[in-house]
Image: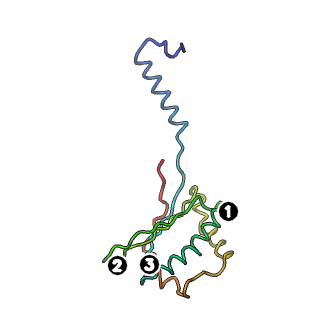
Amino acid sequence: MYPIFQIQHPMMKYFLLLVLFSYISIITAQKDERVTSIEFVQVLNDNEEEAIYYFQNNWKALREMALERGFIDSFQVLEAPANIGEEESFQLMLFTTYANKAQYALREKRFQELIREKGTLELLNDKKPEEFRKSLFTKEMVRHWN
């Protein structure tokens, strides 16, 4: 039998087990350093096709380039039905996740570089972005939990 289990005082056994479990928790726990930007977007004037085309061919294309270069950790687009009767209802949530605060701090510089490289905006039906989408609000530095 291992010497630790031969300790006679019952409180000492519990104390040593508590220390052991605490140590295991500390060495196995990893702090999640990811941060996410979330943009809530309203589609204007029933222009769903134009909005989808725009986000797939511009927003998503830039995130794919950023992901390939290690500029971001991940990205995702979620679509929600519009709330009938609400003027400021959003239909799209755009998530861009960065591995850490350092990667997040470089986001503007890096995306400007990618925008220059990608070139002209791709638009459907020659509609400008302000005609089919409105950014209602953005949440920055959203932290992830373990």
> Which of the two discs, 2 and 3, labels the residue nearer the N terminus?
3
The answer to whether marks 2 and 3 mark residues whose Cβ atoms lie closer than 8 Å is no
The extreme bottom residue here reads 126
Q: Which is in the foreground here, disc 3 or disc 1?
A: 3
Q: Is residue 61 above or below residue 50?
A: above
Q: 78 and 38: which one is in front?
A: 78
Can you identify the residue that label 1 sits on?
Answer: 69
Q: Residues within 10 Å of mark 1 (few under 14, many from 20)?
A: few
Residue 96 location, quadrant: bottom right
Residue shown at the point (61%, 64%) measured from the top left:
106
Can you identify the residue that label 3 sits on?
Answer: 43
The answer to whether marks 3 and 1 mark residues whose Cβ atoms lie closer than 8 Å is no
Secondary structure beneath label 3: strand
User: In the displayed structure, does residue 73 sit left or right of residue 142?
Assistant: right
Q: What percent of the width, then of the height, locates residue 113? A: 66, 72
Q: Residues within 10 Å of mark 3 (few under 14, many from 20)?
A: many
> Which of the two discs, 2 and 1, labels the residue nearer the N terminus?
1
**Distance of mark 2 from mark 1, alpha carbons?**
38 Å
Q: Which is in the foreground here, disc 2 or disc 3?
A: 3
Q: What percent of the width, then of the height, locates residue 14? A: 42, 22
Residue shown at the point (67%, 62%) measured from the top left:
69
Q: 24 and 19: which one is in front?
A: 24
Q: Residues within 10 Å of mark 2 (few under 14, many from 20)?
A: few
> Which of the two discs, 3 and 1, labels the residue nearer the N terminus?
3
Q: Is residue 25 above or below residue 121?
A: above
Q: Amino acid at mark 3?
A: Val
Can you identify the residue that label 2 sits on?
Answer: 87
